[in-house]
Image (cartoon, helix red, strand yellow):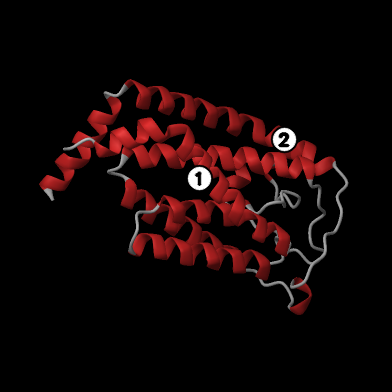
Amino acid sequence: MVTVGLSFTARWRQALAAPCFVRFLATGLAMGVAVVWALPHYFGWVGQRQGVLPPEPLLGFWEPRPVSMATFLVLYGVLLLVLAAVSGRPGRVLRGLYAYLLMMGLRMAAMALVALEPPPAIIPLVDPVTQLFYPGGTPFLKDLFFSGHTATLVLLALMAPAGHARWLAALGAATVAVLVLAQHVHWTVDVLAAVPAAWLAWALAGRLLRNCSATVDRTPV
């Protein structure tokens, strides 16, 4: 246990001693603060737009089910699992941060381009964390294309190291995709589009940070 702790501490010390890592980390955290500030304003604008109803092949086959609790147990459980699995790899943590920021940027752009109305039978998904960023702190129904919860789980599966953590994260992503459809929170197209969007964000983050994060994680301890 002591050896693992020393290894973890040494890796982060070495990462924080690398100028590129510190520069990217500071920039990423500043961008995160900017996104947190901008989201309520952005969602306020999205909520005022008139959207359309997309073709829907699945939701008509079942009545919506209130499964918010299960959705967030899976989401935050997988988040803690993956963060614990990669906590000793600063370069991968940094890539995950940038991938999430890029995914949020892609999602905001997608919502600006594709305005959708919520499914008629929607049961609002009350997220105890993201609810803080919605206008007035009330359930928001029009952040649809693409599904942020599904994309986040897909990102976590990509971020997780190969092995049990990655398989569990992938299972979590599939579960959340089913649950948001079960609750009629998203259209099918929202969930399907989340997968390539998350992969693109992960790939772009890797390309942006490839020299710095690879060097940090390869440093012997």
**For the point 57% across and 46% down, which residue is it?**
200
Q: Nearer the viewer, mark 1 or mark 2?
A: 1
The answer to which quarter of the image holds residue 210 is top left
**For the point 15% across and 40% down, which residue is it?**
6
Q: Position of residue 147 (x, y in %)?
A: 65, 54
Q: In whole angstroms, how far apart are the C-alphas of marks 1 and 2?
A: 23 Å
**For the point 50% across and 51% down, which residue is it?**
155
Does residue 59 appear in this view? Answer: yes
* Mark 1 or 2, nearer chain start: 2
The amino acid sitting under disc 2 is Tyr
The amino acid sitting under disc 1 is Trp
In the image: residue 55, left or right of residue 124: right
Does residue 67 appear in this view? Answer: no
Circle 1: is it few (<14), some (14-19), or many (20+) Cα within 10 Å? many
Q: Are marks 1 and 2 in contact (CB under 8 Å)?
A: no
Q: Position of residue 168 (x, y in %)?
A: 41, 65
Task: List the residue tagged with mark 2.
Answer: 42
Q: Could you tell me which secondary element the residue under label 1 belongs to?
A: helix
Q: Position of residue 132 (x, y in %)?
A: 61, 42
The answer to which quarter of the image holds residue 119 is bottom right
Q: Could you tell me which secondary element the residue under label 2 belongs to?
A: helix
In the image: residue 154, left or right of residue 77: right
Comparing 185 with 21, the one in front is 21
- In the rendered image of this protein, does residue 140 appear above or below residue 77? above
Task: List the residue tagged with mark 1.
Answer: 202
Comparing 65 with 62, the one in front is 62
Comparing 117 with 134, the one in front is 117
